Amino acid sequence: MKKEVLTTIKHCLKAQQFDLATLYRICELTDKVKEIGATKEGLNWMATLLNDKRALLFFTQPSTRTFLSFKNACDILGIKSTEIRDIATSSFAKDETLIDSAKTFAQYVDLIIMRLHPAHESLIEEAPKKLNDRIRIINAGSGSDQHPTQALLDFYTIYKYGFAGKNIGFVGDLQRGRTVRSLALLLTKLDNLKLYFIAPPAYQIKDDILKQLTVSYELVYDFDQIIPELNVVYMTRLQKEYGGNDVPYNQIDYSIHEGNLNKFKKDAIIMHPLPRGSEIAPSVDDDCRAKYWEQVHNGLWVRVALIALMYGMDYDIIAKSSERMVKTLGTIN
Amino acid sequence: MKKEVLTTIKHCLKAQQFDLATLYRICELTDKVKEIGATKEGLNWMATLLNDKRALLFFTQPSTRTFLSFKNACDILGIKSTEIRDIATSSFAKDETLIDSAKTFAQYVDLIIMRLHPAHESLIEEAPKKLNDRIRIINAGSGSDQHPTQALLDFYTIYKYGFAGKNIGFVGDLQRGRTVRSLALLLTKLDNLKLYFIAPPAYQIKDDILKQLTVSYELVYDFDQIIPELNVVYMTRLQKEYGGNDVPYNQIDYSIHEGNLNKFKKDAIIMHPLPRGSEIAPSVDDDCRAKYWEQVHNGLWVRVALIALMYGMDYDIIAKSSERMVKTLGTIN
Amino acid sequence: MKKEVLTTIKHCLKAQQFDLATLYRICELTDKVKEIGATKEGLNWMATLLNDKRALLFFTQPSTRTFLSFKNACDILGIKSTEIRDIATSSFAKDETLIDSAKTFAQYVDLIIMRLHPAHESLIEEAPKKLNDRIRIINAGSGSDQHPTQALLDFYTIYKYGFAGKNIGFVGDLQRGRTVRSLALLLTKLDNLKLYFIAPPAYQIKDDILKQLTVSYELVYDFDQIIPELNVVYMTRLQKEYGGNDVPYNQIDYSIHEGNLNKFKKDAIIMHPLPRGSEIAPSVDDDCRAKYWEQVHNGLWVRVALIALMYGMDYDIIAKSSERMVKTLGTIN
């Protein structure tokens, strides 16, 4: 049970904090926890890993998907969790400053998983400095900019199908929407791939991201024309909730449906951070290239892997996986 | 630990799905889990049965009673559960279609326990077809029609006092109110009993149910006169929340109170799905014939039994119960 | 595993119910559970103590701090808990009487932890009489008068620094605010200490409390002047939410800040039930005399100790602590 922690992640605050070695470590661990989690014995074992930890899911901005995946990831690891959800509209925050609230939470739990309304966004910077040293923090989406665990699950999903030589297209409202922004910053750590940002000018990705890219990329207007080139198609919906430009994409179609599905490569993968609007027709779900539900599923296990890694459980998990493999081989011989 | 699953219940969707053998199996199992759950050792054992499962309590219509019983049933079986409550009035459903939400949930959990607002009622039909095959669904009350686990707990409560030769009276607002409708459809699977539907014409049970009854039944107007005949008295309250007829029962009294309690059989049982209005006076609670709190308690254990049966744990439970009985006998001799 | 229960606490309803021996027992147990909870092995052991129990956190008045501490205390002891939060503004209570709701809860759980809105305050008296005998009740704050577990954590915090010969000052809005009222009634069980109630006349503590005090006390107007005398300074904020007198303290300063911090004794302790307003400047947090975050932390472990004691687990905890001490000594020799 000796542990050498090669990679130390104290907090998970932003996508850019992960170097490529850590990203691959998370992908490797995700594979392992999925595999271990496929049996009752494996799940029971995982539930002992962090059963001495207590977490708070502090969600000042509602989010069903991220909430559910973190809550279940905690359950899988044996972490006892408590929830404060949707306080933006509640009486909570008005009683005290946000940092006083966070200092209070830190007296009860070990890990605070924060989803922050734009009005509370600054807490993600402030908390790691002002809370006591024992506390770990995970950013479960803050303001309009960061959603690092979404980027990790997107990264992992592409990783499963291979990065090398791939053309990765982002489609839709690329200006707003933190998922594309965060993912692009992870992908630029790789080489031998090309990014296509496919959107009308008013929705095109902003320069602040483009300036940070070291991989090759192209800005594309016409979705239909580029479809046959793409190995990965990352669809997004209009981010109406953050205001700003509301002009619909009225001149060109940025959606996938029965009419253009046949133009995609046979082994392309179609992704979407969900919830979807009209940009992917429900009938596409039955196509084997549709990977957005798998992506949701990956979101659960990537978060299990991330939290396990943060607490230095990666070696235990890899050892457990090897032990199981040895047993299986023993059975075969 | 070899298991022969005689009765397979993949989902629990409607009261009518249960044949008589399954109903009795659930009653038998309920007896066993209650008995095992009476000791700490037994509760600890039950908490290992399904501790590899994760459930979502998806309640788009508020319900404290049903929510609490399912949540605690999951806890008893070791199932890790997460809640989404009362989304009818929240921002949730507007982001995506209900089936997309359900497909998302299906990526995180094994079991979805759904309580559906009438506006979402169709999901109970759609989900079993569209979700992946691994997912189990329980209907915890959908729209104005179905509430199968309430029917099961009502069935079990009568079972405890015996069905044979009984006169079972339903009293009050029988037109609306899914509990009477669901329970009547279960009781018609038995014979040697008689149902009395006791209500003013405007609240009398509808033909769609009567047409399905194969047991003998009678429609009764005057509650007072029929009281001495009844072995089981199932009281209900005015279902104001579903709209429709709001004329109070102003000509005749359909309630139980100190003034008529002496007219009931000495061994009659008084039931109510709760919450109650004025149809049972609080002073009746102290009478030994009042069984509605016991009925609530049964609701917890029937749900434990149902979920255990759905996952094929019935043989384990029966074996455990026998083993305990052998031990107890050993101690006596 | 034989247990002699010297102190029996069936319910925790009001601060005054605890005699001095019980208060010290709770303090002793709090020390032990903190110590045992410092290791994973210890936490795992504690999580087996009451893992056959189910609790309901029934909060009809919102309270993040008390809620979080009770929820985490349940988790630490292995108690499975379910929550009903903030029903004052929900549709819940209107369906049935509060006592019917409580009777329902009593069918599902063993322990009901109640935080009651003033409108529901009577339930804390009614429930112990009307619920079945198996049910335990804890008052987590009821109406404007009682908050016994806050009083216990305050008591424990002072205990850690010693009671003997201390001058304890309560500062601010002493008229309303149940924490000062409850704590004063505990402290009067001690002797060899003196209480100072420091407030403008309109906010001074009421006679109903003063009449019950058997320790010496003094009413003080000028905070600044008394500061150097105080060993314990218990700050409070204006209790605006209960209405009544809203005149600000405009003539005199009842707050702690960099300007008067140097006037306090070197070993004074500064307490606050939180949330704070402007009565303690954030910069005071860095002073070693600021103990209000420690006080929050104590709130978690005092509640663990209280619940353990209610269920007669005190001897197990003390035995476990001794066993650990023996092991540690063995290692040293």
Image (tube, coloured by chain):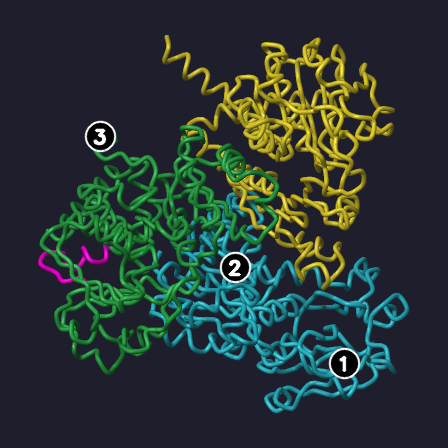
Chain colours: A green, B cyan, C yellow
Q: Residue B111: x, y in percent? A: 43, 63
Residue at 44% across, 28% down: A132
Q: Which mark is residue A4?
A: 3
Of badges 3 and 2, nearer the viewer stands: 3
What crowding class fits label 1: few (fewer than 14 Cα within 10 Å), some (14-19), or many (20 or more)? few
Residue at 56% across, 63% down: B86
What is the C-alpha distance between the residues marked 3 and 1?
72 Å
Disc 2 to disc 1: CB gap under 8 Å: no
Q: Is residue B227 above or below residue C115?
A: below
Magenta stretch contains residue B202: no
The residue where tag 1 is placed is B246
The answer to whether tags 3 and 2 share a subunit is no
Residue at 32% across, 44% down: A14
Determine the chain carrying the residue at label 2: B
> What secondary structure is found at the residue carrying circle 3?
loop
Give the magenta range. Answer: A155-168
> What secondary structure is found at the residue carrying circle 1?
loop
Residue at 21% across, 78% down: A261
Residue C271 sits in quarter: top right
Name the amino acid type tagged 3.
Answer: Glu
The residue where tag 2 is placed is B304
Q: Residue C104: x, y in percent? A: 68, 56
